[in-house]
Image (spheres, rainbow, N blue to C red):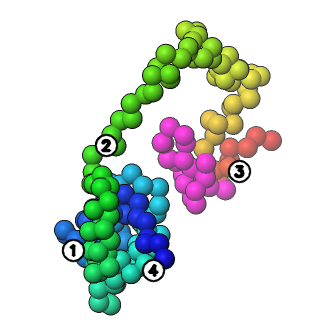
Amino acid sequence: MAEPVYQASTLALLRHLQKHGPMTVHQVEQLKSHCTTAAASRVANLLKRGSVARVGRSMPARYEITGKGREALKTMGKKGLAPRNFGGAAPAVAARPAEADAPVPAWRASDECYTAPELRPFDGRPGAMDAFALPSRMGKVLIFRDGRQASPPSASERIKGEKP
């Protein structure tokens, strides 16, 4: 049977657990790793492989490296895998010479900028935006868009204000 293969970020997690002790899944999420696997999935996979084990019955669950996980670190270290640590930026990948000498695509070579005239401010018919000057009613308070608040007129005030 072939021995299990570990990704560099998984080995980095195992090294971190070995150095710093038990961690929760939330603490694993806080590590600045460049892997695409979710922390909960990564821990569940390591738990299934027997590389980590749950410590106690506390909530949230805390996980620590097992003897099998330490053995995987030793085995993978002997194979000459480059160590990977959490934090810092990913190393820059050098461009291949063929890519560096390639001509710039036509869509990127233009110096002109599209101004999107169809997205300019709305120039609708006169009076189309007048409704936005009216307040919103929230309970017994009228709230205008500029932040002013007023109480609505009572029924008797409305009747007095009406003209026959």
Q: Residues within 10 Å of mark 3 (few under 14, many from 20)?
A: few
Q: Residue at x 60, y 17 (%)?
A: 105
Dot 2 alpha-carbon crowd within 10 angstroms: few under 14, some 14 to 19, many 20 or more: few
The residue type indicated by label 2 comes to Ala
Residue occupying image coordinates x 68% and y 16%: 117
The residue to which callout 2 is attached is 89
- Give the Cα distance between marks 2 and 3: 71 Å
Q: Do the CB atoms of the residues marked 2 and 3 lie less than 8 Å apart? A: no
| Mark 1 closeness class: few <14, some 14–19, many ≥20 residues within 10 Å | few
> Which picture quadrant has residue 64?
bottom left
> Disc 4 to disc 1, how far (Cα)?
19 Å
Give the residue at the far bottom of this rendering: 57
**Whether residue 79 is visible:** yes
Give the SS element for disc 1: loop
In the depicted structure, whether residue 78 falls above or below residue 21: above
Residue 125, relative to residue 150: is it above or below? above
Nearer to the camera, 136 or 73: 73
Residue at (58, 60) in percent of width and height: 139
Q: Residue tagged by mark 1?
A: 21
Label annotation for residue 3: none
What's the magenta region?
136-155
**Label 4, on which residue?**
48
Instruction: Identify the element where label 4 is drawn.
Output: helix
